[in-house]
Amino acid sequence: MKEREIIAQLKQMKAVRPSQQWLQEQAVVLRAQVYSGVEEREELGFWSKFEIMTARLSQPYAMVALIALFFLGSGTAGWVAGQNAKPGEPLYIAKQLSEKAQFALAFNDKSKAKLNLAFARERASEILAMIASNQNGDKVAGLSNDFHKELSAAMARLERIMPQSKATVRPVEVAATKPKATAKAAPAKAAAKPAVAKNQKATTSQPTDPEYFTAGSNKDGLRVDISAVDPTVPKVDNAQEAVKKAEDLFNNQDYQGAQDVLNQANQLLDQAK
Amino acid sequence: MSNISDNSFFSSDKNLLLRLKKYKDKEAFLEAYQSYAEDIYRFLYFKVGGEEDARDLTSAVFVKAWSYVRDGRLKDEENYKSLRAFLYKIARNEAIDFFRAKKAVTFTEASLDGQTADIASSQDLLAEAAQGSDNEALKRHLAHLKSEYQSVLVMYYINELSISEIASALGKSKGNVRVTVFRSLKALRELMEQE
């Protein structure tokens, strides 16, 4: 006999039932026992029903979904709000938390080193902003301290992941972060071509069409020339060297230069295997 | 105020359990009786092998279950994720007590013959269930299986409990229940093939 046949026979046993009359009689007896003298039916009130519904929300799957939603929502909101915060502003803490979260989610030395470089660059940028707004020196000193900490951490990681002999890669020519005065802005690349051609005639030293990064912005003056080489940015041929150079520039209070070199270091790190 | 028994959301197994644990809700208990009395009766019928005993034990199960609810002891039963599993646990214990009291550990072939004749004369619905000799043989072999196998087969194939409900009722892991279902079916097939 096959198991399937046995299962089919077992299912037929569902027909075994007590008589409906007995069931109803028993229900009456049970009701009398349950209420034991209380005559009125008790029914759940509105708040009890509400509590039951909310209690069901405390089921693990619902809680996990709610917690995930909370962290996702608050994390995203905090990240967006804190990106432009400066030290001393209430949202700066959100920025710091966001950085810590990013760091916690980086699982290898290369990603962590890249984050260290990015955060160091951010500290340099914040110092520039603080100086521009004549903020007090304590905060600048704190940021400076943080900058050095980030660089030290980055350097330690770079030593681990790319020893000096293997770290050398093709030097990167990094574009200036400032819009060029000669680069007359156009809304999009296609629209920019006539203007670019005009510029080419004027500056014959450019052998190819210049390329611009507009980040979707259609405003004049907001694009960045990514094909031109800025002679003010020093060339470095490995990430460690770039980090050292950035530290020197920072110590000489060339905060913009330090940022540019840190950008280079990040690109060199991207190119390195 | 609307009658909650009209609302299937509040009458689902988990919500009935919640209403009993949190509010000792009498109506929830009576709804549970309406929903599960047949299944508990059927389970006990196959355990003890007789209509009268199954009826008595079914009544005892619900009385005992209510005493758990009334005394607030159901709250302590954190292991029970479903009300159905909780009722089966009580039913199983009642069956064990029944056999202890009667010192009749197995549902013997001789007693089955007598009871079958008795049932056939007194219960029309049971006669419906016994469709031909195959079903009779199946019932006889079920009675010869060891108690755990019998419980698992009735719960899983006849009363259609989920593996996790059976695990909760028997206090075993889900994996263990799956293995037991497989072994009990195999044991039943071997018994039927021997005939």
Image (spheres, coloured by chain):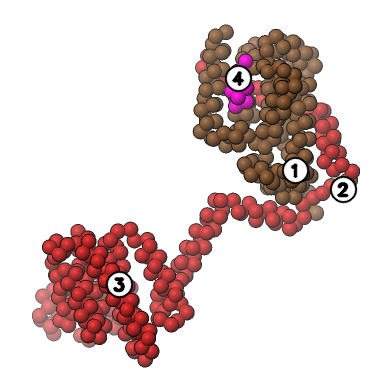
Chain colours: A red, B brown
Query: Which one is in front in this view, the residue at disc 2 or the one at disc 3?
Result: 3
Camera-nearest residue between A142 and A3: A142
Give the farthest residue toward the bottom: A134
Span of residues in magenta? B144-152
Asked whether the residues under marks 4 and 3 belong to the same chain, the reply is: no
Query: Could you tell me which residue is drawn at 24 percent across and 68 percent down?
Result: A155
Label at residue A40? 2
Which residue position is annotated with label 1?
B69
Which residue position is annotated with label 4?
B146
Q: Are marks 4 and 3 in contact (CB under 8 Å)?
A: no
Residue A89 position in % (x across, y down): 45, 81
Output the chain of dot 3.
A
Mark 3 Cα shell of 10 Å, populated few (<14), some (14-19), many (≥20) = many
Query: Which one is in front in this view, the residue at disc 1 or the one at disc 2?
Result: 1
The span from disc 1 to disc 2 (Cα, nearest Å) is 19 Å
Q: Amino acid at mark 1?
A: Val
Q: Are marks 3 and 1 in contact (CB under 8 Å)?
A: no
Residue B142 position in % (x across, y down): 62, 18
Q: Earlier in the sequence, mark 1 or mark 4?
A: 1
The span from disc 1 to disc 4 (Cα, nearest Å) is 32 Å
